[in-house]
Amino acid sequence: MVDVLSDTNTGITPAEVVDVELYHPKSWWTTYIFSQDAKVIAIQYALTAMAIGMVALVLSWLMRLQLGFPGTFSFIDPSQYLQFITMHGMIMVIYLLTALFLGGFGNYLIPLMVGARDMVFPYVNMLSYWIYLLAVVVLVATFFVPGGPTGAGWTLYPPQAILSGTPGGNEWGIILMLASLILFIIGFTMGGLNYVVTVLQARTRGMTLMRMPLTVWGIFTATVMALLAFPALFVAAVMMLLDRALGTSFFMPTLQEMGQLMKYGGGSPLLFQHLFWFFGHPEVYIVALPAFGIVSDLISTHARKNIFGYRMMVWAIVAIGALSFVVWAHHMYVSGMHPQFGFFFATTTLIIAIPTAIKVYNWVLTLWRGDIHLTVPMLFALAFIVTFVNGGLTGLFLGNVVVDVPLSDTMFVVAHFHMVMGVAPIMVVFGAIYHWYPKITGRMLNDGLGKFHFWVTFLGAYAVFFPMHYVGLQGMPRRYHDIGETSFIPASAHDLNAFISVAALIVGAAQLVFVFNLAWSLFKGKEAGGNPWGATTLEWQTPQTPPAHGNWGKELPIVYRWAYDYSVPGAPRDFVPQNEPPGGFAVQGARA
Amino acid sequence: MSAIVLFLAVVAVIAGWWLSQQRLASKPWLETGVIDDARGASSLPPAKIGLGVFLAVVGSLFALFVSAYTMRMELVDWRSLPVPKLLWFNTAVLIVSSGALQWARAAVGRDDGEGVLIGLLAGGASALVFLIGQLLAWQQLDAAGYLPAANPANAFFYLITATHALHVVGGLVALGRTTVKAWRGAEPAQLRLGVELCTMYWHFLLLVWLVLLALLTGWADDFVAICRQLLT
Ligand code: HEM
Ligand SMILES: [Cu+2]
């Protein structure tokens, strides 16, 4: 198909753009279920991720019940506790956040924001979702197999992960977990190829890289990282699966179990740690970079101000992406590594703090003297900044070998990573949903419910994770079902634990309000119009809302400016859409 | 982990070179109007870029295997297994396969439909022979008592060769589709993209195989040792 780009206002000669062959669905099934339209795939990804995320949320409740009121809930035994933390961690990091940011927001926003009709390989894109769904189904199945899910911790360290002392270790749990991860990676790779090539090849006329919204930069860079980092998890998972199923010894040293010499011999558990963290650290940024990008756009739009230091922001995203591949061993300080290695990795870790800090400064400077509208997306964006700074500061503690060693495996670490990669990205997820829901459905989410959801979630998350730092400093270990009578942990810490648990229950319950809001607003929400926030980026300038199949009607938009022309002096409105020619008006999508 | 770090460094150089062409130092807030490096996209078809990105992923997969292999090799109890002679024959066959596809590609350029078909068929057939050869090599090892579970070196050998073979199988599916099209008499021009993609993939797998072979036969030991010294 060839699209003719023409422009009557400025007399620019029409350019012929070879467009992707658009696939046209023929039936209800291929329109809504086996759809190849990135927007439908995005919604499928998002709904699946949120559904499985609810499972992880319920698991966190159960864990908190046990930690807050040890001994009260007899149905949670120690091995179940381990299963809960494992599944909770794994689901949250991979099946919720990674899938939602890349598969959900990536699919929805990339084609729209760069002015494409769809992803470049729609069929592969569809497969990507179905394989992801299969991975989720296999994951859920582990709850129902004999022995239950694996309890090896989300890091799945061997040798314990496949020993009989670990829940699911010599049963189905670990096998299905690894199989599910392998499927997830295959599915993700299919999607990831699409996101990358679409950004590279399907940008519309005028959309240079430096005119892309930061959301696209964040998702793009994160996808490149994920494509290169996930193979490490893949290799680790395959090798562990072989160890478990065929009795090879990639990771399994010679060892005795219950007094019996096992069949294994000669494997290296440390090898697994290297592979796992070679994936695991970039993973943190795979989740963080899309959040960085999205939050930049939320702040700029809702403060009606151009993003401060756009170039710097782009460079920082790229620099963080590159650097995060050379810091993995900071998760292994206690593995007995050579001190010089420790020093090297501590240094690279601290260097990453520089581009990250630049980003934080730029967000703050964007807000400075902005016309801040405290809409729900803006509230969540602000909460993200605060939380991220908070988690980043404790990260500086843990990045230093000497400080990390005593804190390793305490609740301090749990509090740290929940702040940076739990609460902070989730805040962005919520902000982004409140921001783009009107484009996706044509209706606004209810504002009152949204504000309620925000305040309970934000304050609640702090009530949960702030005290957890303190409990960790007291020496409370992580992954313990019950610390019992421990002399160095004062009685007050137990009260604090009970408080944390109550807060966690409340935060969790508040998410039901959010889910209700999503469903209710779909039918009863206020009509949104095409561009309710007065935003500049292309997805708000589509001829229809929700955007139709093919996104742009007959002609692709032409881009004349960067994505952040807010409050331009002399402009008739306080925003200038990217497709508005110099001196003219873009007719479509005027502010409702 | 030196192999993967090295590999990613190469990827980073390529990405950096590409980024350096993208006017990353421009000041987009000052520039309104149509910029006519316009789409910024290269004129290559998306499928080619897609394959290129995919090969980077596959490359990092194999680089990780190599990393894991060399890390395990360092330990004192490493006993590498004797490499069957058959692998040399297989290597030759894989080279022939790559050559045949290169020839098919040249035939596309000459607009020689028959040549394309012959090249594709020869390429596919020799790739099949390669796979059968690999299976036979496994059988020989198995018969000689080198079972996968007996020793880490054996396990690595089977795993790495199997992963490579699976990638060849995947390639054969794509090659099969192109061949069927050629068989049904499609014009060479219509086949161009398919043939080019297959050729690119084949050459890549050949390269990967040569690296793996050097590693498995111990040829690369000196090189690995040098790398290790550089790093420590
Ligand atoms: C309501 C929100 C949440 C609560 C109350 C919560 C609570 C917990 C608790 C109690 C643990 C186990 C601590 C231990 O004994 O080791 C845990 C572990 C973990 N959580 Fe969360 N969490 C929440 C949200 C999240 C989110 C959004 C993420 C996403 C990154 C996340 C990722 C993890 C990870 C990776 C672990 C470690 C699992 C392991 O040790 O293997 N959590 N969480
Ligand atoms: Cu890390």
Image: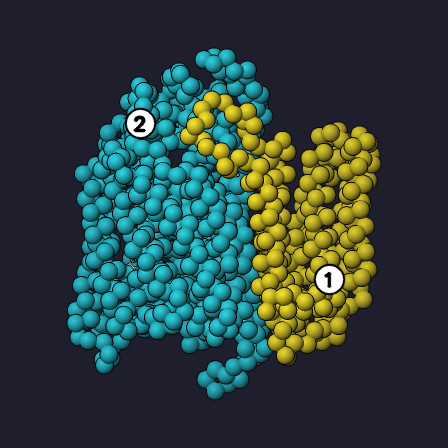
Chain colours: A cyan, B yellow
Tag 1: amino acid: Leu
Element type where label 2 sits in the image: loop
Residue A504 point in image, percent of width and height: 23, 58
| Residue A305 appears in the figure | yes
B49 w.r.t. A263: above or below: above
Element type where label 1 sits in the image: helix
Tell me the residue that label 1 is attached to. B213
Q: Chain of mark 1?
A: B
A263 sits to left or right of A346: right
| Label 2 packing within 10 angstroms: few (<14), some (14-19), many (20+) | some
Q: Is mark 1 within 8 Å of ligand 2?
A: no
Q: Chain of mark 2?
A: A
Give ligand 1's quarter of the image.
Answer: bottom left
The C terminus of chain B: image quadrant: bottom right
The residue shown at (23%, 35%) is A373
The residue shown at (21%, 54%) is A460
Tell me the residue that label 2 is attached to. A567
